[in-house]
Each structure stands twice: as structure tokens, then as C-alpha cells.
Amino acid sequence: MKELYNVSASPHVRSGVTTRSIMRDVAIALIPASAMGVYRFGFKAFLVLLSAVVSAILSEYLWTKFVLKKKICFTECSALVTGLLLGMNLPASVPLWMPVVGSAFAIIVAKEFFGGLGQNFMNPALAGRCFLVICFAGRMTDFAVEKSSRLFYYGASAVDGLSSATPLAVIKDGGAYSLKDMFLGFTGGVIGETSALCILIGAIYLLVRKVISLRIPVAYIATVAVFMLIFGGHGCDINYVACHLCGGGLMLGAWFMATDYVTSPITKAGQVVFGILLGLLTGVIRVFGNSAEGVSYAIIFCNLLVPFIERFTMPRAFGVVKVKKQKGGAAK
Amino acid sequence: MKKGTFKGGVHPYEGKELSMNKPTVQLLPKGLLVYPMSQHIGAPAKPIVAVGDRVLMGQTIAEAGGFVSSPIAASVSGTVKEIRPALTVSGAMATAIVIENDNKYEPVEGLGQSRDYTKLSKQEIRDIVRDAGIVGMGGAGFPTFIKLTPKDDDAITHIIVNGSECEPYLTSDYRMMKEEGEKLVDGLRIILQLFDKAEGVIAIEDNKPEAIAKMEKLVQNEKRIRVQVVKTKYPEGSERQLIYAVTGRKINSSMLPADAGCIVNNVDTVISIHMAVAECTPLIRRIVTVSGDAVVNPQNFCVKTGTLYSEVLEAAGGFTEKPKKLISGGTMMGMSLFDTNVPVTKTSSALLAFKEDPMDLVPEGPCIRCGRCVDACPENLIPQMLMAAAEKFNDAKFEAVSGMECMECGSCTYVCPAGRKLTQALKQTRRSILDNRKKK
């Protein structure tokens, strides 16, 4: 019998975009901010990022191989992105076992326990970070600033190290901080968050590649700005608002963590609502809360609201007219 | 003029350059001609000839099997060899009349005579269109005379000729507009004669500048006809999306175009109306694009209905190498073939052959909720949720998230980075829900 041709239901073509290419784009977009982190905080920062990434990939590998006993499938590269993001959310001063533990928690507990890629309800990198913050609070807030770009630097006790508070903490205590330093990234903080400029470069790359849309980040950042204008207690001080936008994890969170596909709403209106809620929550935590930072908690909290947001933001199908509820007897 | 368009949609590789610059070639069949009784939406036609009868070209060989049905005419002269089940494009067997061609092409009386349609009444025109067996030649095959008989003629404001040809690789409508634009305008005039208050709009995508220029020149002196340029995007040629692009009116799955004051016809359909009304020729031919990277000479053919695809393929020089996939119709909504021994019907717009099957290359991965399907859906649905409901066989949920509005255009599967077969799952669920409704 002669050979038959392939048969399948339409459509018969695909666009070239794959999960792998998306994850690769995100990883590329994170390079400027990571590079800035390494430049600022020295080789130690590189080691932190590396151990976070290696641990994330290894955790996924071991889990799929020995627990799920499935064929290993790394084509998605998502563990790499999770690991990198977690690393970028740690201060350079942490001991290297911390990124390892954090990544393992992110991948195994936050992601695989809930069904793996696409099923986690909470951003794994942020879950890993929050886990570390809660367990090892002291080490997670030790923001040592490396003054010289010495290659080897292991922790806050090094001679050149300067322990400093993050700009947001300074502002919260009533101090002032140079906006230019904050925008370029010459401040204290975790490895990947300090330079708003580098993060924006990566964000523009993602926008150009159509990996993310403006809906979540713009709604988020705009809400924070408005919130700070109203509740910040500094009136119409643009400098103060700008410091809040560039400071802390807002830029990294808004462009790279809040936009995580899996844990953000899929409806377009929902994404705007999600961004606004994030902004409000971040503002509340920063202004009224104990902590100077609020982005991580705001994001993981709003992650939990996603199904709820989607439910109330379902779009109406093309051409479908909303049926008006008829009031009893009125039709007669 | 402003380009009409709609929200959503995708833009796959067009592949039109393969065949768009070659003139259409007349193709005369060599072997048997097969006429399946079901070439349209509705009841199958009923054969009115018997085995051994001699038939003439243009002679009706099967009559309409109901109101929503369409007669079928012989495209050659010859002898009825058998009436038997035959393989059709969909892969199913259907009763078909098989005619042995005598190569004389002897016409029935009056075939090809010119007729002054301006003297015909509206009812006469509709009857001619019905008896000529004209159906929507864009792919759906809805009997055209029903479209042309809305409840209220005066409520129709737009007669839209769908020249957008948004499916990749297809160039048959483009060639027709370039080569037989006069007939197209004339066909549109005939339709406009039925609707006093309507305006004729020829909608063409902006990737066909030559067709736009040609049609604009032809309608220069037509008071009731204009050309509307629409954006090149798939599925611009979908009825609902095209109506929106031209008029800004929206219809949903439970409405007819006439509810928005529109009637949409494909280019080849309008030319067939011209041929039936002005030239007394029933629907016995259609333009078929043969294209794809596995075809030696991609081009368009004017094919007699009933000709086997294998003959059309041979006329295009055959395969450069053995293809993996054969498609009848476009790459987005066409049907794949496992055999080329199926006949060209009234709705066969193309035969495409590809060396690779892209659906084979990407393994299906988990959904990462990226939302690309949401951006692509021209019906403003959430395909991701529809698929989740479909996978759980949750029909109630599927309907609650407007699943029945899906028109199976394929955009969601096209964009899905995880390689998920969304359209396919949606299609299956929709069909099963429709079947269950019928049972009740």
C-alpha cells in the first residue's frame, strides 16, 4: 500500500514563537540588569546569580527525573529564568547556600508541587525570595555596597564593604537620595534591582519582541506614582515620587515579575486591574507598613487574586450584546 | 481612504508570491469526473440521471434535495458511468455521480447565450441563481440564493464582495479580480438589482495593490459600487470580521449577515452569478490555486468541477519531492488530504502541498498562560479557558465562556508557543455540543 499523507485538523501552520524562545527572550532581557549588578557588587554577585540558576535547573532536573520519573525536558528554559530572577532578588552579601536553597524552594515547592510549568499560582522566584526573607531576615537585608570593583568579595565584613540602607529605607526615615544614582543604579539593594535604566533597557527589548505588553507594568507604576502623590506625605514633590518609582524592587517587579504569564490574569482588562491592585498594595506597604519595600509581597498577594480578577473581567465575545435584565412586568 | 480592519487576528507567512503572478490556465479533464452530491451546506442533492444516460455539458444531473440545498450540473458531456459512494475532501464517503468524459464538450441548449438581465425580475434572477447551483465558493458552500433572499430586501444596505483572500497561499480570487474584473463588477450589478437600497462594496486586502487599482478603475463610473481597502490580516475575510471592517457593525454566531444589513459573497461566487444570469452557464467550473513548496509549478487553474485533484496536480508539474502534507483549501482552515483521488467541488479553493508539516515539529507543552491566544482571537474569546473546559469535557463551562462564538479560524493554535492544539479541541467540543442539541 502506498504511503499516505499526514492528516490533521486545521490550522496547518504555526508561528515561530515557542515557550523556549519566549524564555530565552526573558533571559536576554535580564542581562543588562544582572550585568550592572555584577559590575556594582563584584564577582560575588556573579556567584550568587550562578548558584541560583544552577540550583534551579538542577532542582527541576532531579524532581522530574526521580520524583515524577518523566522524560527530562529542558526545552522550556523556564527554570533558568526563575533561578536568574531569584538571584537578582538577593543581596550580593548572602552566603552561597542561600540562593541554592531559595531556588530549590522556588522550583520544587512553589512550582512542581502545584503541577509544574503553567500551574503554579504564585511567582516561583518571589516565593523563593519571600521564603528566604522570612527564614533568614538578617542576611536578606544586609545590603553591602561594594565601593571598588574588586573581583573577590565575600560578605559584608570585607574591608571595602560599606553596609548601607537602601534608598527607600533612607527616604522612609526622612532622608533624601540622589535620583540620578537611583536611576543609574549606584545605590544599595539586591543584585538586580538597583538600576532602573538597565531594567528599562531589558523591558524595552521584551516590548519590542512582544513578549510582554504595557498593560500590567504601566498600570502598576502609574498607580504607585499616583498613590505616592496623594498619600506619600510630600505633596506634589516629583523628586520624591520619582525616587519611589526607581527605588526598591518596583522596576524589576513591574517589568519582570508582575508580567509573569502564569501568575497574572489572562484577560486584558484583568491585567490592568491586576496592575492597579499591585500599585495600591505596594503603596500601602511602603507608606503605612513597617517595611520600606512592598513589591514582593504585593505581587505574591495579588497572584492569589488572579482567578478572582479573571472571573470579573471576562471580555464579551465579538458581536454579543449584553442582555439587559428585564424588570418584571415592564415588558407588557 | 481609511483601511477597514478588526481587533485581533494573526499574520502568517503569505506565500502568495508563488502563484500570484501567473495567469490562470484552463484545465480540461482527462479521466473520470466525480460529482459528490454534497458540495454545499444543507441536504445532499438527488441524482436525476441514471447509469448509462448521456449527459451534456451544463445539464443538471442532480436536483436540490430540500430548501437548503443546491442542484449540480455536469461540467462535461459524456456518459453516466456509475452512481456510487466516493471519497470526498473531508475523508468521508459520499454518494457521487461518476461521468465518463467523451471529450466533445457538447453543451446543453442555450449554454453560454448572453442574456439581458436588466429585463429580469428579482424573482427570476433568484431562480436562475438557485437553478445554476451557485453556493458560497469561499469554502462554506452556503446556497447563494438563500443569502440573496433575506426577509426584507430594503433592509440590506451593503453587498460586500469578499476579495480579501486572507488565507495564506491562495491567489485564485486575486487572479480573478485581475483577469475577470469586468465579470465581477457585472455580477455585483446583478445582485444590486435585487436590493434597491444597497451599496456594493468590493473589499480587498492591502497586499494586493494591482487588484485594488484594477477594481477601482472598473468601478470609476459605477454609482453604487466602491472598493474598500482592508488591512492584510487573517481572518479579514471571515464574514463577521469583514462586515465589521466595512460597516463597523458586529454580528455574533446566532445572527445572519442580513441582520446587520449585509450580504457577503466571495469573488468567484459573484463571477458565477454573472455567468449564470448573463451567460446562462450554471456553476460547472471553479478557480483552484495549486501551491506550496512541494509543487513544481505553483499556479491557478480554471478547473471543471468533478475533476480529480490528482489531475490538477499533474497539470502543475507534480511534486518536487514527496510532500508530508496535502491541504485542500488554505493553511488556516483547509482540510488535509490523505489521497489526491478526490474531486474538485464547488468549494475547493486550493490544493497545497508542503514538504514539512509544522504541526509535526513542535511537541505539545503545558500552557504558560501567555495570553497570545487572547490577543489573536478575532472573536474576543479566551481560548485558553475554552480549552481548559474542553479538556474536562465541561460543556456547560465551555458555553458559559462563549465557546459557541468560536468560528474555528485557527488563530489561537497558530500563535500558541506551547504548541497546543486549541482550535482543534474547540472545534471538537463545539461539534459535540451542536450534536447534543440536535438530539434533544
Image (cartoon, coloured by chain):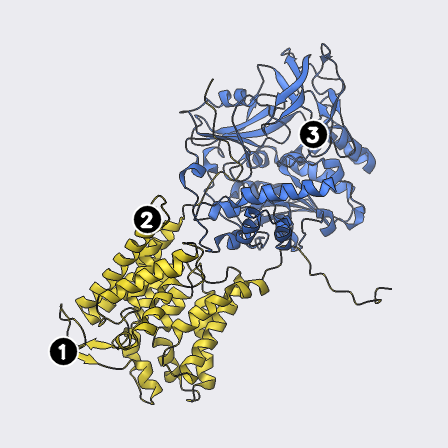
Chain colours: A yellow, B blue
Residue B235 vs residue A328, the one in the foreground: A328
Q: Which chain hosts label 2?
A: A
Label 2, on which residue? A66
Q: Which chain hosts label 3?
A: B
For label 3, count other residues whose C-alpha is less than 10 Å away and answer few (under 14), some (14-19) or many (20+).
many
**What is the three-letter code of the residue carrying label 1?**
Asp
For label 1, count other residues whose C-alpha is less than 10 Å away and answer few (under 14), some (14-19) or many (20+).
some
Would you place residue B415 above or below residue A232 in this image? above
Q: Estimate the x, y position of residue A304 in percent, counting from the top left.
A: 48, 66
Instruction: Give SS at disc 3.
Output: helix
**What is the three-letter code of the residue carrying label 3?**
Met
Label annotation for residue B275: 3
Q: Estimate the x, y position of residue B137 in percent, counting from the top left.
A: 64, 34
**Image position of B276 (left or right of B385):** right
Q: CA distance from mark 3 to mark 1?
A: 90 Å
Q: Residue at x 56, y 53 (%)?
A: B3
Q: Which chain hosts label 1?
A: A
Would you place residue B103 above or below residue B402 in this image? above
Residue B223 vs residue A179, the one in the foreground: A179
Label annotation for residue A110: none
Q: Do the numbered discs 3 and 2 sit on residues whose CB atoms are within 8 Å?
A: no
Instruction: Give SS at disc 2.
Output: helix
Label annotation for residue A160: 1
**What is the three-letter code of the residue carrying label 2?**
Phe
